Image (cartoon, helix red, strand yellow):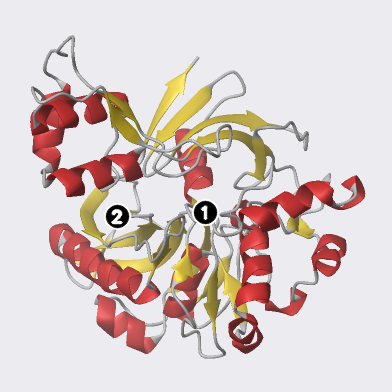
Amino acid sequence: MLHNRCVNGDRRQAVLGIDLGTSGVKVLVVGIDGGVLGRGMAGYPVRVPASGRAETAPADWWLATRSAVHRALAEADRVTVTAMAVAGQMHGVVLVDDRGAPLRPAILWLDQRATAEAATYQELPSEYTAVLGNRPSPGMAGPLLSWLMTHEPGTVRAAWWALQPKDWLRLRLTGQAATDPTDASGTLLFDPGKNAWADPLIDKLGLPREKLPPVRGSAEPGGRLLPGPAADLGLPRGIPVAVGAADTAAALFAAGLKADEAMLNLGSGGQWVVREAEFRPADPTNLYRAVGDGYYRLAPVQNVGVTLDWVRNILGATWGELYDTAARPRHPDAPRFDPYLSPERWSPGATGAWAGLTLAHEREDLMRRSSRRWRSRPATPSRALRIR
């Protein structure tokens, strides 16, 4: 056991955690006793190169991570980081070459380009899909890889690995490729019951199995911090970097959810989560591997913080302005806000709108209605509520 003792004079031992979210990265420096010593945050844009698409340049992730780590270390002051781990957004896909360099922008979970490819899962014999535990969604890695095989075959051929976002970041830190069951179980290419890649399905889809990384436990070492990234981040070279977990799975583990409790997780998207002891798929919810043993069932909503961030940018508002308007009384003739800027699974054709507008309405009316519709902060750490 490590103890929170002083090293190198009066320096304290600590661990560092990175959460690579959709619109920003969050970093915590935590003492061995569990106390938070330092925090850092930095944002980056979700790029929309065409309607229905959502991407981020991994270089933006790295620049933001470097900034957030430096802020957290500056706040912590006089600590020695002895280990680190990475959590992050689920789904999407990052194609990299044999040096770990991205071959194209990362495609995110919000992306809808692979809608037709997701639909083909429904046409496959149940012997291939019953093991997945998930309802197909265009933003998952399986449909996205199928789309890339058709539309960007040269990029796929050149790729060495097809990774999840947090797994790319850890590759950037360590030079070692891996994923964990919590992220792998959200790809539509993984058998959660067997805790292994679903090879028969992957072969049936004609996808390159050799480009999927090894699967290791979330708490297992995923490599050691390389000298270059260590210098960029201001951390000791060679410290171990744990494989880590998907963001919702990590939040569930931290919340210590019991069998009779549910968790509401709010970030760029939103999820209702309950624990499951056994593999028991049930449409239309998703079933993923939990950290350690067991599973969790998840009912997702796409349009939460990502929609608020869009409103804030469109109206040129600060987060303070947006949330101040939410606390004010609602005008009886306020416009209605439909937040479906990204298609929801239960209503894929729905789109976003402000309805009921008149010449009497002002910018504040739009802010009030949108901020009252969904209340979350995508630039801050996710919040978990235990609800009995």
From the viewer's perspective, is residue 155 above or below residue 334? below
- How far across and down, in percent of the image, does residue 333 sit? 18, 13
Q: Work out which residue is located at the far front of the displayed protein and give it.
A: 359
* Visible residue check, residue 193: no
Specify whether 42 is left or right of 283: left
The residue at 57%/90% (across/down) is 98
**Residue denoted by label 2:** 28
Res 14 quadrant in image = bottom left
From the viewer's perspective, is residue 89 above or below residue 353? below
Res 3 quadrant in image = bottom left
The residue at 37%/41% (across/down) is 267
From the viewer's perspective, is residue 233 above or below residue 287? below
Question: How packed is label 2: few (under 14 Cα within 10 Å), some, or many (20 or more)?
Answer: many
Q: Element under label 2?
A: strand
The front one of 124 and 319 is 124
Q: Element under label 1?
A: loop
Is label 1 in contact with label 2 (beta carbons under 8 Å)?
no
Three-letter amino acid code at the position of disc 2: Leu
The residue at 83%/60% (across/down) is 201
Res 63 quadrant in image = bottom left
Three-letter amino acid code at the position of disc 1: Met
The residue at 22%/73% (across/down) is 8
The front one of 275 and 237 is 275
**Residue denoted by label 1:** 90
- How far across and down, in percent of the image, does residue 10 sit? 16, 65
Q: Work out which residue is located at the far top of the displayed protein and give it.
A: 332
The front one of 39 and 185 is 185
The front one of 75 and 211 is 211
From the viewer's perspective, is residue 100 above or below residue 111? below
How many discs mark residues in the rendered view?
2
